[in-house]
Amino acid sequence: MRKPIAAANWKMNGNFALVEAFAKHAWPQGNVEKIFGLPAIYLTKAHEMGLAELAGEDVSAHVSGAHTGEISATMLKEAGASYAIIGHSERRTDHGETETLLIEKWKQLKAQGLKVIYCIGESLQEYEAGQCDSALLRQLNPVLDAGLVDADTVIAYEPVWAIGTGRTATPEQAQEMHARIRAFVASKYGQEVADNCSILYGGSCKASNAPELFAKPDIDGGLIGGASLKAADFKAII
Ligand code: PEP
C-alpha cells in the first residue's frame, strides 16, 4: 500500500545555512516519507549532513557531454538524491518543457534508479474553461503510453492557479482530480499499479489546510513550496 509523503520544493530559495538548519532539525520519524527537493548545488551538503530523502528539482534529458549548465541524473545520484521533480509548471512555463522532453528526462532518471515526482496540473485559463480533464490527459497520457509509470512513481497534482497564490483547491476539488488521475492510471496500467501510485497535492498547501486535504482518500500527501522553507512549517505539515 502507498505511504504518505510530504515533499518539499525549495525552488530557487535557500542557502547553505538553511540546509544546515534542516539537516540538524529533529524531524518526525513516523510513517510519513519526507522528501527534500533542493537546488542541486545544496544536495551534496544536505546528503553529507544526513538529510534524506533528497530530490533534484529538475534533470537533464542527456546522459553527459556538451550541455552547459545542465545536471545529469548520474550527478544527482552522486550528490545523494534518490528522487527528482520533473514537469513542474514553472519549468513548463519558464523553459517551454514539453511531454516529449519530460519523457527523455524520466528515462534518464529511471536508468539511474532515481524515482520521479511528475508534476501535472491545469492553468487558470483551463480551469475557468472547464478543461481540467483534457489538461491532465495531455500531460499524463504521453508518459503513461511511454510505459514510464511504476509503483515508485509519485504524481503531483498542482493546479497552476493555486501555486504560490494562497488560493488552494478545496479538499473536495482536489479529491475529485486525484481520483480522476488514479482512474487514468488504472485505465492504462490496471488498478494495482494505480492503487500503489502516490498522488500528492500541491498548491498553497500549509499546516492549516493540510489535514483536510490529506484526509481525502486519494490525496497521499503534498508537494510543498512556500511552506517548506521553514523547518517548523514543514514539520507541522509532516
Ligand atoms: C510548488 O510549486 O510545487 C508549490 C506547491 O508551491 P506553493 O506550495 O508555494 O504553492
Image (cartoon, helix red, strand yellow):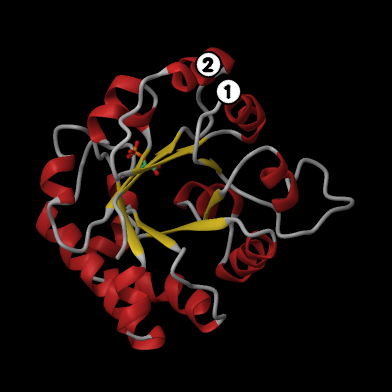
The quadrant of the picture showing ligand 1 is top left
Label 2 SS: helix
| Residue closer to the observer: 168 or 40 | 40
Q: Residue at x 10, y 59 (%)?
A: 172
Three-letter code for the amino acid on which mark 2 is drawn = Glu
Q: What residue is disc 2 on? A: 20
Three-letter code for the amino acid on which mark 1 is drawn = Met
Q: Quadrant of residue 40?
A: top right
In the rendered image, the vertical position of residue 190 relative to residue 208, given as above or below:
below
Q: Residue furthest top?
A: 17
Q: Residue at x 46, y 64 (%)?
A: 153
Q: Quadrant of residue 111?
A: bottom right
Quadrant in which the N terminus is drawn: bottom left
In the rendered image, the vertical position of residue 11 relative to residue 23, given as above or below:
below
Q: Residue at x 54, y 74 (%)?
A: 148
Asked whether the residues under the numbered discs 2 and 1 touch, taking CB atoms below 8 Å apart as contact, a structural biologist would say yes
Q: Quadrant of residue 26?
A: top left
Residue 132 image offset from top left, x and y in percent: 28, 69
Label 1 SS: loop
Q: Residue at x 63, y 64 (%)?
A: 110
* CA distance separating discs 2 and 1: 7 Å
Q: Residues within 10 Å of mark 2 (few under 14, many from 20)?
A: some
- Disc 2 vs disc 1: which is toward the camera? 1
Residue 129 in view (yes/no): no
Looking at the rendered structure, which numbered label has been put on residue 49?
A: 1
Quadrant in which the C terminus is drawn: top left
Residue 95 in view (yes/no): yes
Looking at the rendered structure, which numbered label has been put on residue 229?
A: none
Residue 3 image offset from top left, x and y in percent: 31, 55
Q: Which comes sooner in the sequence, label 2 or label 1?
A: 2
Residue 93 image offset from top left, x and y in percent: 51, 51
